Image: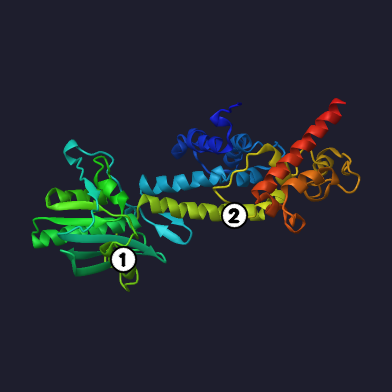
Amino acid sequence: MQTYPLSSFPLVKKEIYKRVIEKIIFYGFEVRFTDTAKQATHLNKLQRLGLLNITKYYRTVSTEALQVLAGVPPIILTLRNLMKIFRLRTLGEDIQIGNRNLRAEDLEVNNSILAPWEKLKFGWRYLQPQEGGYCIFTDGSKKDGRVGCAMVIFNEGRQILQQNWRLNDEASVFMAELHDIKMAISHIRDLSLKKAKIITDSRSVLQALNNPSNTNPSVLGLKELLRYTPSVEFIWTRAHIGVAGNESADFQAKLGTERPIIDFSYSMPLSLLKSLLLTENLGTWQQLWSTSLKGRDVFQLCPMVNLRRIHGNFFINQGITGSWNIAKHQTRFFGANPDCSCGTANEDREHIIFHCPQWAEIRKEFFPRNFVRLSLLGILSNERARTGVEAIMKKKLETIFETIQA
């Protein structure tokens, strides 16, 4: 059985490019990046080498098309985002994201180093059937861009209290989960309870509390409260499995998002900043792709940019780009005869895939019966039809090599 190295797979190559190659290119960007046209051209050339390796396209395919087919945004846009984060976090300068102005004080700042005595961890366990005692269920929610959280309290199976709050829209669901746990701890301290259980469906929060090296300031603040509240026991339950307290907390958290006023405000987490920059990045990339004069054959199949897209099959790529071994491409670059060898029409990708009688048997085997009604995008979206396109392009390439050797 023939085996292939992992690095031969397009997805692996893309991951290596993102995790290694880009990091090497970005090294020292804080000093070296000037955002000039000359620098953008040089960066595009560097990125192009990686994209050609990922997608296995020919060098005649434009860089803009390669970026779309590999699902990798223009490197200059990524660098601009990194520079904005650097200016905001390190230099303390204001930045603009769309119509929104962000100040350094709006961003949540993590402590990078913890003293040994500050490294606290708090464990948790799974919810047991018929959990008794003083139980506080907490939950957070984000709905229509608004953030809410809530706690619902049960004592020996009887609901005695419910509260919800609304947080500022910049807060994350993680922050909402932390906040309602903080409110639950304050409630326990106010009543001087000897023992209480906080039950949540947020495993990420429980893992953060159990991680002694977590430097999130909100997590550290919560740990400081817990240091002096030894009566708290944390319990995790799976969401939406019919646990009454959890379902009630979820409902109250959603109601919290509908409150007319904001009860508590938190700084913007770095994750939200990156998400906003990525959204802006994708919008700019889409505009560049839609208005570009290059790669229009690819644009017909892939009009929308997508980070998850990856085309790395050599033979299918010929059908997507109409490159190299197709007469239309040869005519454009070398003035060759544009006619197909079947003698019925000019040879382009649509003729080869849909109409050329030389490949009728392959189409009959792999294509759906209504393939003539489908677009090329519809054919390439069908897994079995894609196999047929690959077989056609592979057979055509073999025919060309046989002709050359003869």
List x then y, in percent, for residue 303: 65, 55
Check disc 2 and report the residue beneath it.
286
Q: CA distance from mark 1 to mark 2?
A: 36 Å
Is disc 1 surrounded by few (<14), some (14 to 19) or many (20+) residues within 10 Å? many
Residue carrying label 1: 253
Q: Nearer the viewer, mark 1 or mark 2?
A: 1
What amino acid type is highlighted by mark number 1? Answer: Ala
Total number of numbered discs in the rendering: 2
Snapshot quadrant of residue 202: bottom left
Image quadrant assignment for residue 83: top left
Furthest residue toward front: 129
Give the camera-side residue of 183 and 99. Answer: 183
Is residue 149 among the parts visible in the rendering? Answer: no
Residue 328 visible in rendering: yes
Eyeballing the image, is 177 above or below 84? below
Precedes in sequence: disc 1 or disc 2: 1
Quadrant into which the C terminus falls: top right
- Which of the two residues, 246 or 229, is positioned nearer the viewer here? 246
Relative vertical location of residue 19 with respect to residue 268 in this rendering, above or below: above
Q: Specify the farthest residue to the right.
A: 343
Res. 251 image quadrant: bottom left
Identify which residue is drawn at 62% across, 36% down.
Answer: 45
Amino acid type assigned to the residue bearing label 2 in the image: Gln
Q: Give the side of residue 232 with respect to residue 210, left or right.
A: left
CB within 8 Å, label 1 to label 2: no
The percent coordinates of residue 105 (x first, y second) are: 32, 54
Give how far across and how far down residue 18 sits, in percent.
51, 38
